[in-house]
Image (cartoon, rainbow, N blue to C red):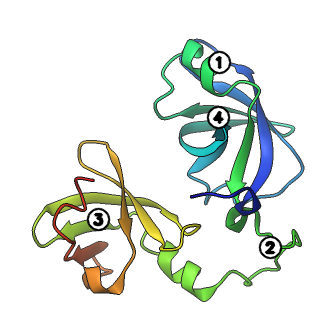
Amino acid sequence: MLQTDDLIPVGKAGKTHGYRGEVTVFFNDIEFDEDGVRYFIVSIDGLYTPYFIESIRYTGSGTAYIRFEGIEDDVRAKEILIGKTLYVERVHAHLDNTGNRLTEGEETEEEDALYRFIHYTIMDRSAGNVGIIKDLDLQTANPLFIVETLEGKRILIPIAEEFIKEIDDEHRLLHTILPEGLITL
């Protein structure tokens, strides 16, 4: 579960742009890894909820138009996002636990090693093609792969050595032996 200490505010959802759910976001001065961020986090009724980015268009001067997965129209965008602060996980802002900026290369080697699996396909011995790893959640006690299934659903799979049978870097495949029922949770 995400905690306030794990998050850095990077902007605010100002208003809708058009009627298809696109939102104008005004970023603050906090620098973050724009290419590494696949979602922004918003506090909804006190719970930090990730909203995955469908598209983003930077307009200059710290502003962007962002469309989020699952937000299909301006009414839904107004209900959920307008006026809300957008956060990224501390690792994307390159800040340590005290708020000091990390210098290049200070991220942990373990995190760097795990990020290489983004865009790998998970092939399970029993379930077959589970989906594509879209992101990582390293803020939980047990790190997780965020996987998009063939049906477009997002599922979480624990990153555990005992689940990984083989890594095929050439074909970007992660062969696994996942516990029965894990994928259907």
Left or right position of 60 against 110: right
Q: Earlier in the sequence, mark 2 or mark 4?
A: 4
Above or below residue 119? Residue 61 is above
User: How far across and down, in percent of the image, does residue 51 sit?
Assistant: 55, 41
Q: CA distance from mark 1 to mark 4?
A: 15 Å
Q: Earlier in the sequence, mark 4 or mark 3?
A: 4
Neighbours of disc 1 within 10 Å: few (<14), some (14-19), many (20+): some
Picture disc at residue 121 = 3
User: How far across and down, in percent of the image, does residue 154 sit?
Assistant: 36, 48
Helix, strand or loop at label 4? It is: loop
Q: CA distance from mark 3 to mark 2?
A: 32 Å
User: How far across and down, in percent of the image, does residue 94 sit?
Assistant: 76, 69
Residue found at x 69% / y 63%: 92
Residue identified by numbered label 1: 78
Answer whether labels 2 and 1 touch (C-beta < 8 Å): no
Above or below residue 141? Residue 78 is above
Residue identified by numbered label 2: 97
Q: In this orientation, does residue 173 appear?
A: yes
Neighbours of disc 4 within 10 Å: few (<14), some (14-19), many (20+): few
